[in-house]
Image (tube, grey):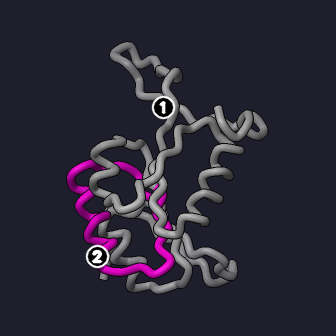
Amino acid sequence: MRGGPPAAGITFARSAPDSRGTADLSGHLKVLLADSDTGRAIAIEQRLREITDAVIVRVPAGGTLLDAVSAEAPDVIIVDMARPDRDGLDDLRRVSIDNPRPIIMFVDRDDRGFMEDAIAAGVSSYNVVNAAFPDVNCRSGSGPPAR
């Protein structure tokens, strides 16, 4: 495994129970990393490799998120959107409909309306990078917030 052994024994593994209710922990979690900033994507990938034995794959240069999800069949998707836009949300919505799986999103600015739209599009975890703790809004759910 590149990047050395997992830090502090942290391991991510699939644990889908079989017909007897027994979990198979032999397979590793596959994480798809989608970030248009190559330098940041490499840094995130290296850090993930330091702390886990998960299989880390990235959306190839010039590739689309939808194609990467179809080709790689990840267990989890990590999306970093330095400049969130509606096209990105449309792709996430399609992924959530066609290939549902947890989606973790990191953004560089707080925008409550965009956060609500992202959660409605299927984002499981919305995180503002470098947000002051009092500014963090906790949201959970599988659909749009009640109005």
Name the quadrant of the C terminus.
bottom left
Q: Earlier in the sequence, mark 1 or mark 2?
A: 1
Residues at badges 1 and 2 in contact (C-beta under 8 Å)? Answer: no
Nearest the viewer among 36 and 61 is 61
The residue carrying mark 2 is 87
Counting other residues with Cα less than 10 Å from the Cα at mark 2, is it few (<14), some (14-19), or many (20 or more)?
few
Residue at the farthest front position: 62
Counting other residues with Cα less than 10 Å from the Cα at mark 1, is it few (<14), some (14-19), or many (20 or more)?
some
Residue at the farthest right position: 8
The reply to whether residue 126 is in sight is no
The residue carrying mark 1 is 14
Total numbered circles: 2
Residue 126 lies, with reference to residue 48, above or below; the image says below
The reply to whether residue 72 is in sight is yes
Residue 142 location, quadrant: bottom left
Percent position (x, y) of residue 50?
71, 44
Name the quadrant of the N terminus.
top right
Percent position (x, y) of residue 16?
41, 28
Element at badge 1? loop
State yes or no: residue 96 in magenta.
yes
* Callout in the foreground (1, 2): 2
Nearest the viewer among 119 and 46 is 46
What kind of residue is marked 2? Asp
Residue 124 lies, with reference to residue 69, above or below; the image says below
Element at badge 2? helix
Residue 27 lies, with reference to residue 88, above or below; the image says above
Q: Which residues are magenta?
A: 78-103
State yes or no: residue 126 in magenta.
no
What kind of residue is marked 1? Arg
Cα–Cα gap, marks 1 and 2: 31 Å
